[in-house]
Image (spheres, rainbow, N blue to C red):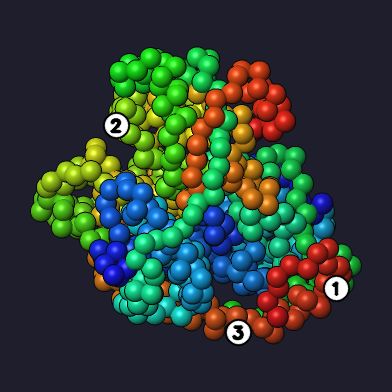
Amino acid sequence: MSFKVTKPGVLSTFQDGGRWGYQSLGVSVCGAMDLVSHHLANLIVGNSTDMATLEITLMGPTLVFKQACCLCLTGADMQAKLNNKPVARFRPIVIKAGDTLIMPLAKEGTRAYLAVHGGFALPLVMGSQSTYLRSGFGGWDGRALQAGDEVGFNIKLDNAPEKLNKLSNALWDTRIYLPSSLGAWSLRKSTVRWIKSTTWPEFTRESQQSVLQTAWRVANDADRMGFRLDGPKLALSVARERLSEPTTFGTIQVPAAGQPIVLMADRQTSGGYAKLGCVASVDLPILAQKKPGDNIHFLPIDVEQAQALDAARRAAFEELVIQLTNMHQHIRATVASINHLGDIVS
Amino acid sequence: MASDWIRTIRPEGDRCLIVELGDQIDETIGRRARQLAQAIEAARWPEVIEVIAAFGTVAIFVTPISNPPAEALADRIEALSQTLPEVANLPGRKVTLPVCYDARYGLDLEKVAANAGLSVPALIAAHQASICQVFTLGFSPGLPYLGVFDERFDIPRLKNPRLQVSAGSVGIANRQAVVYPRMLPGGWNLIGATPIRLFDPKADEPSFLKPGDEVTFKAISVEEFEALQSQAPST
């Protein structure tokens, strides 16, 4: 056991890059809502990007550590405090046995991500550690964390105080240059770039204009499955029967009632509603960091542009891995034992 | 030519392509979609992370690693489709699903029979005489969409869906059937239930049914249902 949950928070679930390969069996992909913050937390503590992080929504849990570790918080600013002192985000933090971490309330953004060096000791279910809330499997017993849960780490750091102090100092001396396209960039943006679907011309001219000009309000009904958006009702010029077809992360569908829904991490694998288009992968974190009542604007781009932005984001991550290599050596030098070897970036 | 199968290839966002083969529920189109999906999987293109077939479409999910322009992948799919045999030859597994048609499970049996102009026993016989195909699984893990039944099974969904449908329930609507793998909300007309556990995430083969399976139904008694259910406890 490595940390104990003493207060659960609103919704804290373990998520990785998603449970890919089973959509043909009707299994939702799941995974982190804000994949950029999730990847970043893992990279900063020296993990592969596929390891599960703890996705913390709006109000975070209180965690009491029984074991030293190196962790990183990214994404929303939860006003985290370690033993009552503010904790820097986007930095590796050394935790000692007995430390208490609180994450009271999101001041900016909605979802924070917590990674520990070596990852959490969670079983792989169908190849993934992601929690699938709706079907009750994966992650921590298929559910959000509750008070009393005790979660283990794959890798234990040496608990000796002098070693941890040395690591702390070495990490403190390390500068991390975060590219502008990573970091906290998504928290302050509200313009979401998207790609029009081939059924876009089937919407009325008025509806098309509404999509482009409206400040869409994230509805109360906005969770890991999808975000409903409040605004003008959208309509098709000609209604027609549609066969259910696959969907993806960011698909914007419009049910008959005319209220758009952006499909998110826990989306169903297929849907039969008319599609406006799809949010560009690079801007999905902007949406993932919104909460009910926040406004967004849609800005159309073409698919080639979206793919180029996506590739550039990927390249920024690759550069970051190189930049952080030396820092990760310090963390590895403090490892005491490895329970089962996770997939660590070397 | 097999390449005539493809109507359009369109991007679904920047990490997915959708190949459209048809816009109706049709067994030939369903088979073609699965054949194309299998061929794309077998090609093992490095950027492809998942391929799924659903009714008349195939979706190809890709990583942003190599990020080729959408056209390049579309061209490869087009070329691949031309190498496929004209008549999709994909013998599905033959699966028999035991169903108890007792009124305690078949809550809408009388309504479905009346809609078909049949007695309840005749409807049950007609359901067992049908061979259907798993077009896709969705809505919930392991939930099959089965079709196509003849016009006697053409009945709309319930106007007011039930908030809870028991695990194993077999529902009919619009010449299709579904089987609920777990307790779920649902608007299909219930004609019976199977004791088979359709989905177990911890099993090597998590789903009892797979796309393309040829499914027939076989009537069992309440006693048989309960005996089978105790062997395979469902969640």
Q: Between B38 and A262, which is closer to the camera in this rendering?
A: B38
Q: Between B154 and A205, which is closer to the camera in this rendering?
A: B154
**Residue B161 higher or lower than B216, as above or below:** above
Q: Between B180 and A118, which is closer to the camera in this rendering?
A: B180
Tell me the subunit letter for badge 1: A
Q: Residue A201 lies in what quarter of the image?
A: bottom left
**Residue B108 higher or lower than A207, as above or below:** above
Q: Which residue is the site of mark 1?
A: A163
Q: Which amino acid does label 3 sit on?
A: Gln
Q: Can you give x and y, in whole percent of width and height, for residue B111 in the image?
A: 36, 17
On residue A114, which mark appears? none
Residue at 83% over, 63% down = A339
Residue at 87% over, 64% down = A159
Q: In this view, does A74 lie to the left or right of B21?
A: right
Residue at 70% over, 24% down = B227
**Local secondary structure at mark 1:** helix
Q: What residue type is labelled 1?
A: Lys
Tell me the subunit letter for badge 3: A
Q: Which residue is the site of mark 3?
A: A323
Q: Which of marks 3 and 1 is in front?
A: 3
On residue B151, which mark appears? 2
